[in-house]
Image (cartoon, helix red, strand yellow):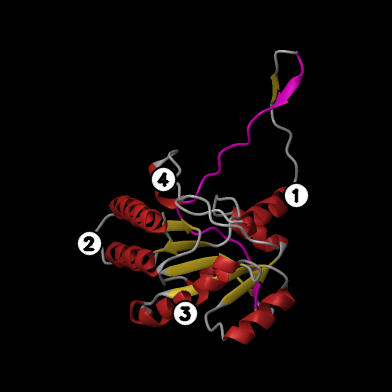
Amino acid sequence: MQARAAAPWHTDPMTPLRALLLIGVATLAALAGFLAWRALAPAQPPPAVMTTHGSPAPAPPPARTIPDTLPAFTLKDRDGVPRTLAHWAGHPLLVNFWATWCAPCRREIPLLKTLRRSYAAQGLEVIGIAVDFREDVLKYAAEIGLDYPLLIGEQDGLDAAAAFGVDPVLPFSVFSDSKGRIVAVRIGELHADEAAFILARVQEVDAGRIALPVAQQQIAEKLRELAAIRAKSAA
């Protein structure tokens, strides 16, 4: 698959949580993943809406809802063993959706490896979910020394991405606290300054020093600030 330049950052104004979660960039790899999901998803006939010519027009698709907690799904790890995210219950998680053909996904991997080492004392676990062909993922993971837990799926990987309430735009990263509550979703390539701020808020939530909605609001504001700085630097 081919890649194109990243689109501008954006937020989703629908709800405070989604405003927090849907800041990101869209790449051609992301578009390809979305189209693949749309092509494979079962069709559901929408309610008919009459046009001015009297013919039915399709209703807009229902808005997706990002769950409050990590959704339940099962994917096989690199050894072929079925796993759920409950396997890492009790740990704050950084769940990263990626693919070998996605350039920004590949760029993120060194950062993800560093974050896992740096926050090991706080119990953080990084889980990579590869939405890709199994053979390609295993080969690439071995070549680069990808050392964090890895789950792999094709259609079931797309289904797992959809379970988070966002279109499968790659890469995207989900941050949860040790109770499995979703604190933030970062769509697009994750940067070190963003990860550090989000993980600091996750630690505050886990320690009971800050309420989850307050942490989400702080993250939303910080990500907008960082996005503006990056956009200005790129101009």
Mark 4 residue element: helix
Q: Amino acid at mark 2?
A: Arg
Q: Position of residue 12 (x, y in %)?
A: 45, 43
| Mark 4 residue crowding within 10 angstroms, few (<14) / some (14–19) / many (20+) | some
Quick one: quadrant of the N terminus? bottom right
Mark 1 residue element: helix
Residue wearing tag 3: 113
Q: Which mark is residue 39?
A: 1
Q: What is the C-alpha distance between the residues marked 1 and 4?
A: 27 Å
> Magenta span has 233?
no
Mark 2 residue element: loop
Q: What is the C-alpha distance between the residues marked 4 and 3?
A: 28 Å
Q: In the figure, is residue 160 to the left or right of 57?
A: left
Quick one: quadrant of the C terminus? bottom left
Q: Amino acid at mark 4?
A: Ala
Q: Contact (CB < 8 A) between labels 1 and 3? A: no
N-term-proximal mark, 4 vs 3: 4
Q: Quadrant of residue 158 in the image?
A: bottom right
Residue wearing tag 4: 19
N-term-proximal mark, 1 vs 3: 1
Q: Contact (CB < 8 A) between labels 1 and 4? A: no
- Residue drawn at the location 50% of the way across and 49% of the way down: 66
Residue wearing tag 2: 209
Extent of the magenta region: 54-77
